[in-house]
């Protein structure tokens, strides 16, 4: 049952004065339930509870955290149709998308459960003492990763489950041993509250401390600002726009105690179609990319918004087929009137740029809040001169840049902002003649794809979902997969500590049986 209240730890609360409703973009009507924005008192209480919970939660065993994470997944599944119906009513997305995203969310939670149960993720490192070393004796030093403290997670507009209340950021932070305060996204506050109730139930069932999780409603930016500025908050996770992520990053850096903001932000995900690929498989790739560009109304951070190729008949044919195929796709509903409003505004700004040509734009009547797809094209020289053409248009929009030669192609890639993904479409071993292009692309992205599409982010240990700024605020980390846990920990060393006082991960006998590095050698053996 959705109450419209905030979860301040395990207590429902609604003492604030600001209220709001969510919106069903498909029916173009407000949903019924009224939500109360968290007040300053509730914000302070949630952070205070998280700070207190951290004192014990940071020491909870991997086995117990695993039980907690698995129970969250179980409780989310118990929500059943109520969660799916609420998801759809707040997003306009189809039931299949809701089911798929729920499955991804529970899979993420169980992946982290397995990680912390095994335990080697803490990167335990032991350098034993050498008291007879000359000229200076060597002391015993042992290092492992420890949780950083209370984490604030911002729910994402385009993934109400997988990147929101119990999404990747929350799952990773809880796995690390960090209490989490979620700033729920106002577009899907009901979905957020249902998932929050599942987390709270799981925490109670598994004996986690009160305050290990809170869920705060917000109608705008005020709650998020107060959380980031709160002195007891130690890190922030964000998925959204460059403008929003950069504002949080700057705010956190200006605190008396600066804290890290791990923001996954904008990306146009450049796709390079090499000459032989355009010549031999141009029609195939055009049809494939018509689907990728319009998938989910283009509301993915990995949407292919930029296609680069060599000017000529083969690229012209690719553009023609892409244009013919993309208008065959039935437009679909965007997440919110504000989202489609931004899409239309950004699309119009892009179309007003000198030298940009609209190749095709869907021009039939569509339902309210349904997005019309568009393909544009521009000369390479024009693209190089006008950085406004580099900007993301969030929605079913893509631009084809017609390059004069290899040198211009390489120059364009090298001058792009940081991206989440880059793709190479190639044929008949021609990639060997474009090593500089590949190297330039690798330097600007977090993941490079060979003969595929960027849409779709596999949740696995090898995945990197991040990249140079502004794709993310720290290119050393991924926001997807079990390695994303590294954002919420810091390395910590114990020097000359008695064995019995050390964490179990660092004790001589290795009671957890984890993999450790001892004097430079990886082993599971006791010391």
Image (tube, rainbow, N blue to C red):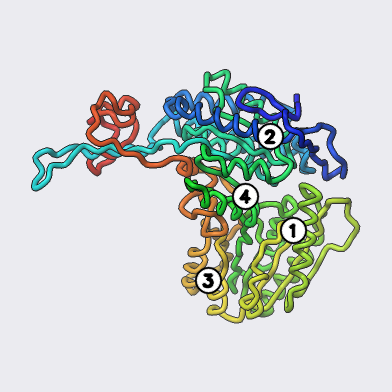
* SS for dot 1: loop
Question: Given contact means CB atoms under 8 Å apart, are the residues at marks 4 and 1 in contact?
Answer: no
Name above or below for residue 335 compared with residue 165.
below
Instruction: Say which residue appears at 88% left-offset and 54% top-offset.
Output: 366
Q: CA distance from mark 2 to mark 3?
A: 46 Å
Residue 32 location, quadrant: top right
Name above or below for residue 222 compared with residue 513.
below
Name above or below for residue 89 compared with residue 479.
above
Please name which of the two marks, 1 or 2, marks the residue nearer to the observer.
2
Sequence-earlier tag: 4 or 3: 3
Q: Residues within 10 Å of mark 1 (few under 14, many from 20)?
A: many
* SS for dot 3: helix
Sequence-earlier tag: 4 or 1: 1
Q: CA distance from mark 1 to mark 2?
A: 37 Å
Residue behind mark 3: 414
Residue 272 rendering spot, x and y as whole percentages: 59, 68
Q: CA distance from mark 1 to mark 3?
A: 25 Å
């Amino acid at each position: 049952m959705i109450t419209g209240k905030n979860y301040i730890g395990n207590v429902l609360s609604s003492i604030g004065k600001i209220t709001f409703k969510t919106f069903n973009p498909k029916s173009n009507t407000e949903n019924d339930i009224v939500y109360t924005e968290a007040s300053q008192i509730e914000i302070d209480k949630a952070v205070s509870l998280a700070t207190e919970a951290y004192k014990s939660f940071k020491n909870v065993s991997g086995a117990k955290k695993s039980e907690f994470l698995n129970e969250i997944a179980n409780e989310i599944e118990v929500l059943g149709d109520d969660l799916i119906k609420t998801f759809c009513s707040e997003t306009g997305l189809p039931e299949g998308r809701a089911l798929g995203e729920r499955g991804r969310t529970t899979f993420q939670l169980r992946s982290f459960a397995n990680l912390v149960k095994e335990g080697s993720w803490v990167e335990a490192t032991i350098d034993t003492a050498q008291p007879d070393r000359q000229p200076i004796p060597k002391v015993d030093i042992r290092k492992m990763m420890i949780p950083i403290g209370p984490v604030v997670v911002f729910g994402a507009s385009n993934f109400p489950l997988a990147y929101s209340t119990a999404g990747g950021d929350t799952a990773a932070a809880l796995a690390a041993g960090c209490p989490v305060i979620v700033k729920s996204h106002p577009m899907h506050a009901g979905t957020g509250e249902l998932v929050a109730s599942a987390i709270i139930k799981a925490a109670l069932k598994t004996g986690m401390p009160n305050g290990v999780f809170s869920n705060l409603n917000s109608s705008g930016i005020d709650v998020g600002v107060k959380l980031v500025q709160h002195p007891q908050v130690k890190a922030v996770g964000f998925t959204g726009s460059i403008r929003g992520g950069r504002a949080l990053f700057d705010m956190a850096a200006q605190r008396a105690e600066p804290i890290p903001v791990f923001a996954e932000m904008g990306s146009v995900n450049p796709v390079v179609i090499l000459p032989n690929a355009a010549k031999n498989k141009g029609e195939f790739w055009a049809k494939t990319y018509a689907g990728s560009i319009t998938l989910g109304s283009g509301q993915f951070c990995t949407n292919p918004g930029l296609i680069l190729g060599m000017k000529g008949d083969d690229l012209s044919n690719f553009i023609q087929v892409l244009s013919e195929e993309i208008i065959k796709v039935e437009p679909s509903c965007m997440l919110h009137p504000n989202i489609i409003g931004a899409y239309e505004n950004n699309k119009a700004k892009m179309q007003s740029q000198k030298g940009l040509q609209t190749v095709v734009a869907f021009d039939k009547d569509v339902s309210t809040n349904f997005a019309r797809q568009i393909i544009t094209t521009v000369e390479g020289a024009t693209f190089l001169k006008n950085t406004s053409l580099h900007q993301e248009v969030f929605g079913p929009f893509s631009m084809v840049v017609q390059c004069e030669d290899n040198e211009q192609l390489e120059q364009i890639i090298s001058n792009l902002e940081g991206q989440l993904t880059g793709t190479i479409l190639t044929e008949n071993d021609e990639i060997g003649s474009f090593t500089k292009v590949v190297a330039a692309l690798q330097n600007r992205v977090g993941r490079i794809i060979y003969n595929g599409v960027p849409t779709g982010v596999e949740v696995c240990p090898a995945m990197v979902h991040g990249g140079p700024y502004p794709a993310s605020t720290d290119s050393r980390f991924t926001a997807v997969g079990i390695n994303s846990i590294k954002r919420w920990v810091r390395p910590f060393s114990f020097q000359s500590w008695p064995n019995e006082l050390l964490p179990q991960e660092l004790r001589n006998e290795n009671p957890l049986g984890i993999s450790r590095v001892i004097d430079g050698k990886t082993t599971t053996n006791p010391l």
